[in-house]
Amino acid sequence: MEVYSEKQQIAVAIDALRARKQTLGLVPTMGALHKGHLQLVKKALQDNNMVIVSIFVNPTQFNNTSDLKAYPRNLESDIALLKTLGKNTILVYAPTVHDIYEGRPVLQKFDFDGLDFEMEGKYRHNHFNGVGTIVKRFFEIIKPDNAYFGEKDFQQLAIIRKLVDKHNIRVNIIGCKIHREASGLAMSSRNTRLKPEYKKAAPFIFEILTAAKNQFGTKSATKIAHWVEKQFEKHSLLKLEYFVIADAKTLKPIYRKSNKNKYRAFIAVYADDIRLIDNIALN
Ligand code: PAF
C-alpha cells in the first residue's frame, strides 16, 4: 500500500488513475483508525476503483490545544489496520501540517446557514470552520468522485453537505451509519483514551439515547430532555454537556413535533476529560 506525505506525489498517482478513467473515493480521517473507519473504507472500496484514506490531525479544528496535543496518533498501526483489508486499491495520504497549509495554518471562515451555531458549535468555537477548511482543502487536492463520512458526527456531515452545495464542489457526499462496539458505545478514536472505569461506564450514553427514542412517541422533547438531565445528575462518572432533540435537516432544537419532519437526539458527555458525542434517529 502506497503512503504519501506530499500532495505533489499523490497528484501523480491521481493523474495516472484519472488517465485510466478510474473513479476515486476519499475517506478523510484524523487517524487512530478503528473498525468504524474500516466500514467507511469498505464502502468506498465497493463504490470506487481506487480509495484514498487521508490521515491528518487537523490543527485548525481544535479549539483546545491540550485536546490537539492529546489526540491519539499512530500512523504505523493505522497502516497495518488498513492492510488487513487486503486491497491494493487503497492509497494513504498522511501529509504534514506544512504540506496542507503551506506555512502557518490559517482558518477559513464559512457561512453554513447557521448549521454551525447549534450543538457542537456552541461548545467548540470555530470547530466547523476548521473542518470546512481542511475538507475543502482535501477536495481541492484530491478531487474525489465520492467522499465518505460517519453519521456519528451527524452535524459535521450536514455541514460538509452544505459546504459542497454552497461552493459548487463536484463530489458526492456519502453518510455511513454509526458503528458501535458490542456494548453500544459509538466507535471513536477517543475511546482508546478512556480509563477502564470510564470505558465501562460510557455505554450508558447509548442506553440513554435508546430510552429517549422509546419515549419520543409519547412525550414532549422538553420532558425527555429533563429526564435525560436527571439521569446524568445521578451518574457518578459521566458529565452531560448537552442533550438536544433537533430537526434532522435544520439541526434546530424542536419545541413541537410534526409528522412531516425527521428528528434526532444529539448528546455530548464528558467521561473524565474525554469528550464523547453520539446521536440517534428518533422517527
Ligand atoms: O471526522 C473527522 O475525523 C474529521 O473532522 C475530518 C472530517 C477528518 C476532518 O479533519
Image: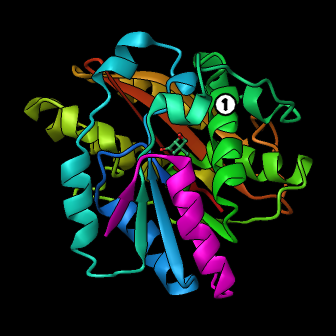
Residue 190 colored in magenta in the image: no
- List the single residue furthest toward the top: 65
Label 1: few (<14), some (14–19) or many (≥20) C-alpha neighbours in 10 Å: many
Horizontal and vertical percent position of residue 260: 86, 63
Q: Is residue 208 above or below residue 170?
A: above
Residue visible at 55% across and 49% down?
A: 7
Image position of 169 (left or right of 134) = right
Horizontal and vertical percent position of residue 237: 22, 22
Image position of 29 (left or right of 15) = left
The image quadrant of residue 205 is: top left
Image position of 239 (left or right of 78) = right
Residue type marked 1: Phe
Which is more toward the observer, 124 or 47? 47
Per the image, the residue denoted by label 1 is 128
Image position of 14 (left or right of 234) = right
Q: Is residue 268 among what the camera can see?
A: yes
Residue 13 colored in magenta in the image: yes
Q: Quadrant of the C terminus?
A: bottom right
Q: Is residue 231 above or below residue 262?
A: above
Q: Is residue 182 among what the camera can see?
A: no
Horizontal and vertical percent position of residue 123: 58, 17
Q: Is residue 56 above or below residue 179?
A: above
Residue visible at 27% across and 36% down?
A: 73
Which is more toward the observer, 8 or 147? 8
Residue visible at 67% across and 78% down?
A: 18
In terms of secondary structure, where does tag 1 sit? Answer: helix
Query: Which contiguous range is marked in magenta?
Result: 1-27
Residue visible at 32% across and 28% down?
A: 71
